[in-house]
Amino acid sequence: MQMEETSWRQKSRALWLGKGDHNTKFFHRIANLHRKFNFMSEVTVDGNHFEMADNMKSSVHGFY
């Protein structure tokens, strides 16, 4: 029984090594897509328009 379990474990690891790269590629594609849509290039707070990251951060922090 031990030999059969070892054989299945080795097969599963070999399968994971082959398919693991596809999953990683998929994960990075989705993560980059989310990063693209979650990016804020500008913010308008109380009618004032901010484009620089430091100004955006301080204006949003001051608003709340």
Image: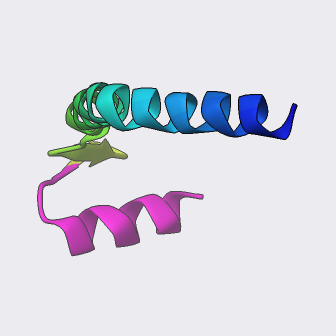
Q: Quadrant of the N terminus?
A: top right
Residue at coordinates 27% horizontally, 42% vertically from top-left?
Answer: 47
Q: Is residue 40 left or right of residue 45?
A: left
Left or right of 55 on screen, residue 13: right
Q: Is residue 5 magenta?
A: no
Residue 58, horizontal then vertical, whole percent: 38, 72
Looking at the image, which is closer to me, 19 or 42?
A: 19
- The foreground one among 45 and 7 is 7
Who's the residue at 23% across and 29% down the image?
A: 29
Q: Residue at x 50, y 66 (%)?
A: 61
* Magenta span includes 51: yes
Total of numbered circles in the picture?
Answer: 0
- Per the picture, the main secondary structure of the magenta-coloured stretch is helix
- What stretch of residues is rendered in magenta? 49-64
61 shown above or below 18: below
The x, y position of residue 20, in whole percent, is 37, 34
Q: Is residue 49 left or right of residue 22?
A: left
Q: Is residue 33 left or right of residue 9?
A: left
Q: Residue at x 42, y 34 (%)?
A: 14
